[in-house]
Amino acid sequence: MKLVVTGRHFTVTQAIKSYLEEKMSRLDKYAKDIIDAKVILQMEKHDAVVEVNMRLKKNNINVKECNLDMYAAIDKSFDVLKNKIIRYADKRKDHRHRKVEEPVED
């Protein structure tokens, strides 16, 4: 997965970037068709805002979360993103055609 990290109104430190990369790498086990993710980190007054735009093969997932701490906002957005990816993967599995068993005649 290709990851692009952008900081608005502050500079993204290497610690934040490596923390983000470690969190995002965990998402590969939930969906194999992730193409790329764009993460925008910004500071608005006293809140840290994390916006994630993830592109999958047949879907786009967008998440925007805020918190007082940047790491807490990243954790919060990761949890929401994980739940959305799991729901997306479950929908893809449920829409496959299942074989219909023919009734057994006695």
Image: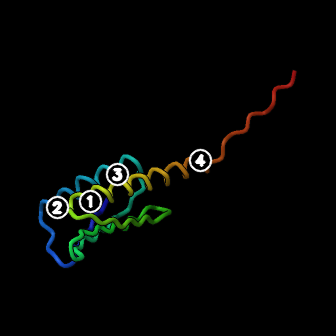
Residue 67 % position (x, y): 27, 64
Q: Secondary structure at mark 2?
A: helix
Q: Earlier in the sequence, mark 1 or mark 2?
A: 2
Please give the label number shown on residue 16. 2
State the residue in front, 70 or 38.
Answer: 70
Asked if the residue at tag 4 contacts the one at tag 2, i.e. Cβ–Cβ closer than 8 Å, the answer is no
Asked if the residue at tag 2 contacts the one at tag 1, i.e. Cβ–Cβ closer than 8 Å, the answer is yes
- Looking at the image, which residue is at 38% across and 52% down? 82
Q: Earlier in the sequence, mark 3 or mark 4?
A: 3
Residue 45 in the image: above or below residue 88:
below
- Distance of label 4 from label 1 (alpha carbons): 30 Å
Mark 2 Cα shell of 10 Å, populated few (<14), some (14-19), many (≥20)? some
Residue for badge 1: 74
Under mark 1, the amino acid is: Ile
Residue for badge 4: 94
Asked if the residue at tag 1 contacts the one at tag 4, i.e. Cβ–Cβ closer than 8 Å, the answer is no
